């Protein structure tokens, strides 16, 4: 049977078909759907769970592998930064049963704070990298990954990119095969990494890499498609697909194994073509490896490191290199400049109330990773920093300690992000006698990635009921004395409480208590409308940045736009009504 | 470019049903025994952003992305989005635009304005462009969410894919209980003339 599957779906399918038993992850675009598919379709055979962060996800998957289960840890590219600590020494211990680490990189930063190229992590940790170029390979490479992992006693990195994760293609469906593994066996020289053991293991890892290089020369993962021998291209991942479309006449050495490279195979390929190029997305990773081996090749000179590649960029690279005629038929019409549509907080989003209050408080606001980061953009314009998961609290402490910013520092962090990496920073704030205010925007879901469960939602990934970690109790246990709960729709009360907490000279935590409007279910109350008799067209309601409020097209006698509220979109949160000085926003009883 | 690959670019605004439409089109292509790929970026789309979906089908498809200016059809669910993307249409291709404006909040700040007479501008570039009152038609049929199947119906006039396959896929993939209604929407679009 054949199905049309996204790379993420195909990878989950592969994990099921090739005997996967344990999966752990923290949600992150573009990797999230892998786990959702595991939990929705394969829960009879595959145990899957959300970890509070990627480090825990990897450590747990490592434990499951040591314990004899074929395992996988799934994360977006920046998640591997968090999991880098276990990764580097995991390379030394090797595995029990097969272990795969999925990194889903995000070239073009469709939904990320950077576009780091995680292939360097594979090299850094001396572990093999497999790079599927479509959905079928995303499934098939799981089988190869398990075989390599168990044969060479190594974790294997399976690297996806957004275009692999979120593009659909045809996939052949097969039956589940299982592998037999025994449980954990004590072996302290392998599993206890103290210096005397680690020294021996490092020697083994150097040997392992040599063997992997031999494997790379032989494996079917790296294959040559012979065409015209004038131009040869070494490529992999999605760049392979773009290359085949851009330059169908070229011969191609397709790398399914991105590290270590089959250097002899590449040398032989090089000797049989006139001009040799390497086409790869992001950094010159293959290019550096190939050049160090003494092979003359051109890559980044013609194909950009910035953002995703596509057929046009690859074609242009070959044209610039002089090996391809410029395609004159492809005269593209000029593009019209049309207004942007930046993402905004949803109508009724509880974060909006907090942003409106923070703006009134005139504080410095350190942000974090989550929907509330959208509060950085006009018209809310409130968030001042955003770096990585959990950074808001550390930032606020640092800015306060630097002592050069007059405004008080307030950190805002979501519930899931707080469990991910905010707790330790809050401990630091208490321990180091900071006086910052930390707002935990607790909407009881992981909203930005599509509403995943987390330790505050009472459900596991597989849908079981579980205990809720109580945020006020947790903060109290960390030593915070002043903890307040606020309703972010009640702007006046939230303002009064935050004013008091911000002015306090010890750490305070303020927790919001309204759920996300989208997840787990859409919330909608009676919508509001503009009473045009009362509206003075002052424009203050526009400043809350609600997508349900727009210009009606009508203006008042001074030419100022009169707003209109879309009743289909309005959820009846009343935030706009509370900022309207004319009391012109009322319930829409129609 | 491999000959015989058909490229369809579907565009709109988050929440309009662009992704379901491209899902249906891909499944119809697949059930017609064609190699099929589809690509879009998830993530921010739920929050009012621009949504684009590339669907490619034919004997063998490599890249999941349509090269610049090589769309055989641009199916736009919104006027400004039609204007933004119509340059991607081949001169021999067809641009089909839903005659509906979705005005983003950013316009109310006064920094940006919604384009004037977008339909005329689209027609200037693509004289054969079809401007469809799909939103009005959907409301007449009893459900404003039928826009995507009506638009697919119009698109289907220009593609060599069998009607039964369209209907089978639409009935299978439409939200529960709306199969018949979506079939009706599709057939209305399929016979639309202008």
Image (cartoon, grey):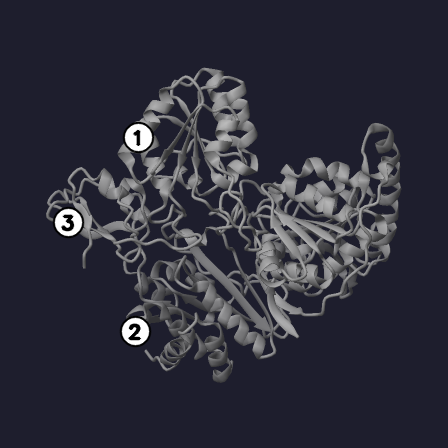
- The disc placed on residue A531 is 3
| Residue at the (51%, 36%) spot, across then down | A418
Q: Quadrant of the C terminus of chain B?
A: bottom left
Does A390 appear above or below B63? Answer: above
**Residue A132 coordinates in the image, percent (x, y):** 69, 57
Q: Tell me whether the residue at label 3 lies in contact with that at label 1, contact meaning CB atoms closer than 8 angstroms.
A: no
Which of pointers 3 and 1 lies earlier in the amino acid sequence? 1
**Residue A219 coordinates in the image, percent (x, y):** 83, 58
In terms of secondary structure, where does tag 1 sit? helix
**Residue B176 coordinates in the image, percent (x, y):** 43, 71
Does B132 appear above or below A385? Answer: below
Task: Answer yes or no: is residue B145 visible.
Answer: yes
Q: Tell me whether the residue at label 1 lies in contact with that at label 2, contact meaning CB atoms closer than 8 angstroms.
A: no
Point out the frontmost of discs 1 and 2. Answer: 1
Observer-nearest of A43 and B47 = A43
In terms of secondary structure, where does tag 2 sit? loop
- Residue B18, by quadrant, is bottom left
| Whether marks 1 and 2 lie on the same chain | no
Observer-nearest of B75 and A102 = A102
- The disc placed on residue A495 is 1
Residue A113 appears left or right of A84: left
Separation of marks 3 and 1 at Cα, in angstroms: 26 Å
Q: Which residue is mark 2?
A: B142
């Amino acid at each position: 049977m054949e199905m049309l599957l996204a790379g993420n779906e195909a990878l989950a399918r592969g994990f099921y078909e090739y005997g996967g038993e344990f999966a752990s992850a923290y949600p992150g675009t573009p990797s999230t759907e892998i786990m959702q598919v595991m939990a929705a379709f394969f829960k009879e055979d595959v145990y899957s769970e959300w970890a509070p962060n990627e480090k825990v996800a990897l450590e747990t998957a490592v434990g499951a592998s040591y314990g004899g289960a074929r395992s996988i840890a799934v994360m977006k590219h920046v998640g591997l930064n968090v999991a880098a600590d276990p990764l580097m020494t995991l390379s030394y211990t090797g595995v029990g049963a097969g272990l795969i680490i999925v990194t889903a990189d995000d070239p073009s930063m469709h939904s990320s704070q950077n576009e780091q190229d995680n292939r360097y992590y594979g090299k850094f940790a001396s572990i093999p990298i497999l790079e599927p170029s479509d959905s079928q390979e995303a499934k098939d490479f799981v089988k190869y990954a398990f075989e390599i992992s168990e044969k060479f006693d190594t974790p294997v990195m399976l690297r996806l990119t957004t275009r692999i994760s979120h593009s659909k293609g045809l996939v052949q469906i097969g039956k589940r095969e299982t592998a037999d593994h025994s449980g954990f066996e004590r072996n302290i020289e392998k599993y206890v990494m103290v210096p005397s053991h680690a020294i021996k293991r490092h020697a083994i890892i150097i040997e392992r890499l040599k063997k992997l290089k031999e494997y790379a020369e032989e494996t079917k993962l790296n294959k040559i498609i012979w065409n015209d021998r004038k131009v040869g291209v070494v490529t992999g991942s999605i760049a392979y697909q773009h290359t085949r479309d851009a330059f169908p006449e070229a011969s191609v050495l397709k790398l399914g194994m991105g590290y270590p490279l089959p250097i002899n195979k590449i040398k032989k390929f090089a000797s049989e073509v006139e001009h040799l190029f390497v086409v790869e997305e992001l950094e010159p990773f293959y290019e550096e490896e190939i050049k160090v081996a003494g092979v003359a090749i051109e890559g980044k000179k013609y194909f950009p490191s910035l953002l995703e590649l596509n057929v046009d960029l690859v074609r242009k690279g070959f044209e610039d290199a002089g090996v391809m005629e410029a395609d004159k038929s492809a005269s593209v019409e000029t593009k019209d400049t049309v207004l942007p549509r930046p993402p905004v907080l949803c109508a009724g989003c509880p974060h909006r109330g907090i942003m409106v209050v923070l703006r009134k408080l005139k504080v410095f606001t350190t942000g974090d990773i989550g929907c509330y980061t959208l509060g950085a953009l006009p018209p809310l314009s409130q968030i001042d920093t955003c770096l990585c998961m959990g950074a808001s609290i550390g930032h606020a402490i640092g800015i306060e300690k630097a002592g050069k910013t007059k405004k008080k520092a307030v950190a805002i962090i979501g519930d899931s992000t707080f469990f991910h990496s905010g707790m330790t920073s809050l401990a630091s704030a208490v321990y180091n006698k900071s006086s910052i205010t930390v707002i935990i925007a607790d909407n009881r879901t992981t909203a930005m990635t599509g509403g995943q469960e987390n330790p505050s939602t009472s459900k596991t990934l597989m849908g079981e009921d579980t205990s809720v970690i109580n945020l006020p109790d947790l903060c109290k246990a960390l030593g915070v004395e002043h903890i307040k709960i606020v309703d972010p729709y009640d702007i006046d009360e939230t303002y009064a409480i935050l004013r008091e907490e911000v002015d306090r000279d010890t750490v305070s935590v303020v927790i919001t208590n309204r759920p996300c409007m989208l997840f787990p279910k859409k919330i909608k109350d009676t919508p509001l409308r503009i009473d045009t008799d009362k509206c003075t067209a002052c424009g203050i309601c526009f400043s809350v940045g609600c997508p349900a409020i727009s210009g009606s097209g009508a203006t008042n006698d001074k030419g100022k736009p009169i707003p209109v509220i879309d009743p289909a979109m309005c959820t009846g949160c009343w935030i706009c009504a509370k900022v309207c000085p004319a009391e012109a926003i009322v319930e829409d009883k129609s | 470019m491999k000959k015989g690959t058909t490229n369809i670019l579907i565009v709109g605004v988050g929440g309009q049903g662009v992704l379901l439409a491209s899902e249906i089109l891909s499944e119809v292509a697949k059930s017609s025994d064609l190699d099929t790929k589809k690509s879009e970026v998830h993530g921010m789309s739920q929050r009012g952003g621009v949504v684009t979906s590339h669907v490619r089908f034919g004997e063998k498809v490599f890249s999941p992305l349509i090269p610049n200016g090589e769309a055989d059809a641009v199916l736009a669910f919104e006027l400004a989005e039609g204007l933004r993307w119509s340059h991607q249409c081949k001169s021999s291709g067809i641009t089909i635009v839903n005659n509906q404006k979705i005005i983003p909040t950013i316009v109310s700040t006064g920094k940006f304005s919604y384009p004037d007479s977008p339909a005329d501008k689209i027609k200037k570039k693509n004289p054969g462009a079809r401007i469809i009152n799909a939103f009005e038609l959907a409301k007449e049929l009893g459900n404003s969410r039928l826009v995507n199947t009506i638009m697919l119906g119009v698109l289907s006039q220009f593609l060599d894919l069998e009607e039964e396959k369209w209907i089978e896929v639409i009935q299978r993939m439409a939200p529960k209980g709306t199969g018949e209604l979506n079939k009706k929407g599709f057939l209305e679009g399929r016979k639309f003339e202008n």
